[in-house]
Image (cartoon, grey):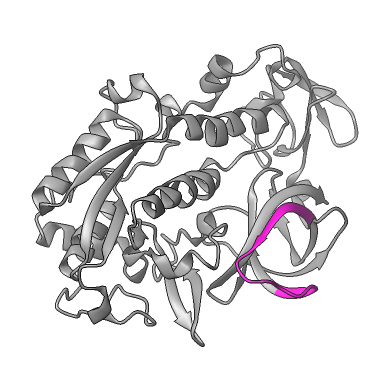
Amino acid sequence: MDLNDKSKYIPRCLDVNYLIKKKVAVAMSGGVDSSLTAAILLDKGFDVIGVTMQLQAGASYLSSDNSCCSANEANDARRVADFLSIPHYIVDFSEEFQNKVVNYFVEEYLKGRTPNPCVACNKYIKFGRLFDFIDELGIDFLATGHYAQIDCINEKYQLKKGLDLKKDQSYVLYNLKAEQLPRVLLPMGLQSKDETRALAEKLNLPVAHKPDSQEICFVPNDDYKAFLQNNADNSADALQAGEIVSVNGEVLGRHNGAAYYTIGQRKGLGIAAEKPLYVVKLDIPSKRVIVGGADDVFASKLTADNIHWIYPQTLPLRATAKVRYGPRIADCIVNSSNDDKVEVTFDTPQRAITAGQSIVFYDDDIVLGGGVIDGIEI
């Protein structure tokens, strides 16, 4: 955590002396990670501008809640910007966020899939609309507080896991484009969360002790069921009552909407059984939630679509993969499939693979790319 080391926090292919007074926009959410990102880059000699994205129209910026879309968060970002004596702007991307993230979130649940709004937000908003915005202003770099790295290997920019594997956020960044990598800075990926807290305290940042947000930013109280009821067509099949059945077709109980269940779920089924039961499939057209034993939750193969490779890859490909956000990773082989999909075969069966979630492929700690899980083969 030595801020006097001018080369730390900067990708090896960038000359530190070249960076002096280069413009960088820091996406400031009001949290400690993005706030420390701004402080570090200011210390490195960048011309730093703080940018906070307004992601919900009107009401969210008049509310007093603590979600990352709220007025409180914008005010915290402004307080940090004032503390650092850097300009701070709020940009309204609420229309794009509604179309690309919120609507997608609802539509996926109505299809019986589990969406990943952070992946969508990074693809379309942070490294989509915001990246285009800084281009329009002639700003050289975009920085965020993500715990991931951009490094140079054989003179090629690569997206890598963060050093703190428990905090690593490379999974949600796999849609970054190769041509964007030289212009993205991710200082937090070079340290642990504990080091972030300690350095924020050392620098007396106003948000040094602010707790991390664990919620979906646009879902009040993290209650996605209530959010669906308030924002979706309540006549949709996914929100209608139906049967809970075993993998053998035996009716075991009733549910109030298949969209309210997730693959691998055990609690809240309301079924008395000799052995624990888990959700293994959602059949939306028949309004059925299908449950089975612990072994039924594991799968060896999946297909994925919406494939994005940071650099072109030749298939078949031996890789490791994550099927959800978190540290768990598995060995696999990636093959081409029909309709621009890939088929992934795991060396060992994986638990609770879920349609709608992303699968992200790695070569050791380098992110190769990823896609959206479409089909699962038990």
Image coordinates for residue 188, horizontal then vertical, percent: 32, 64
Q: With respect to residue 71, does 189 lie above or below?
A: below
Residue 192 makes an appearance in the image: yes
What residue sits 72% from the left and 22% below the top?
Answer: 238
Q: Give, as a single range, the part of the protein colored magenta.
A: 301-318
The image quarter containing residue 292 is top right
Image coordinates for residue 77, horizontal then vertical, percent: 22, 43
Q: Is-magenta flag for residue 195?
A: no
The image quarter containing residue 149 is bottom left
Image coordinates for residue 366, horizontal then vertical, percent: 54, 73
Q: With respect to residue 256, does 269 lie above or below?
A: below
Is 221 left, or right, of 285 in this rendering?
Answer: left
Q: Is-magenta flag for residue 307?
A: yes
Image coordinates for residue 88, horizontal then vertical, percent: 21, 44
What residue sits 32% from the left and 66% below the top?
Answer: 187
What residue sits 78% from the left and 55% below the top?
Answer: 302
Is 150 left, or right, of 234 in this rendering?
Answer: left
What residue sits 39% from the left and 50% below the top?
Answer: 136
Main SS, magenta residues: strand
Is residue 236 or residue 140 the one in the foreground? 140
Is residue 265 or residue 63 the one in the foreground? 63
Count of marks overlaid on the render: 0
Residue 269 makes an appearance in the image: no
Is residue 60 or residue 285 the one in the foreground? 60
Is 257 left, or right, of 337 in this rendering?
Answer: left
- The quarter of the rendered structure image containing the N terminus is bottom left
Q: With respect to residue 210, does 332 lie above or below?
A: below
Is residue 120 or residue 46 the one in the foreground? 46
